[in-house]
Amino acid sequence: MIDPTEAEQLAISFLMAEWDIPEEGKECFTILGTRLVTDMWYIVEIGVEGLPDKWAIQADDTGYSDPNYSFISPIHAADGTADLTQLPESIAQAIASEHSNA
């Protein structure tokens, strides 16, 4: 069984690999919450400081994260991306893409 810290590390690693975010982008992410769902997996919520967006990623005791994650945001693509200009380009692109898919 994995512990919450391991689940968080798995989720961050998955998110960075999913969006091809360089290692230096890791500091932009914040763990918003980690919830044990069963004795075998956690839901890890990850956000970017200053933004209302978050990813909910399942991390389980096999050491993998579920590729069927959820992106939750009150912002839609039509609302623009002005808030993203202060972020590293790879993270801004990931969030803008998620907004357009929401």
Image (tube, rainbow, N blue to C red):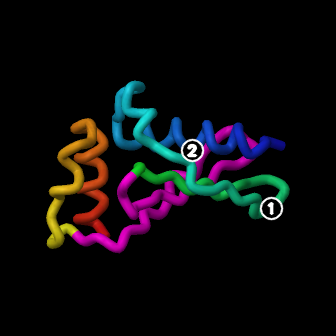
Q: Residue at horizontal 19%, vertical 67%?
A: 77
Q: Residue at horizontal 23%, vertical 65%?
A: 100
The image position of residue 44, as x and y in percent, is 61, 54
Q: Which residue is mark 2?
A: 11
Viewer-closest of 65 and 73: 73
Question: From the viewer's perspective, is 58 left or right of 84?
Answer: right
The image position of residue 87, as x and y in percent, is 27, 42
Q: Which residue is mark 1?
A: 38
Q: Residue at horizontal 30%, vertical 53%?
A: 95
Give the main secondary structure of the magenta stretch: loop
Residue type, label 2: Ala
Quarter of the image for residue 73 reads bottom left
Viewer-closest of 73 and 65: 73
Q: Which residues are magenta?
A: 50-76
The image position of residue 88, as x and y in percent, is 26, 36
Q: Quadrant of the N terminus?
A: top right
The image position of residue 91, as x and y in percent, is 30, 43
Residue type, label 1: Thr
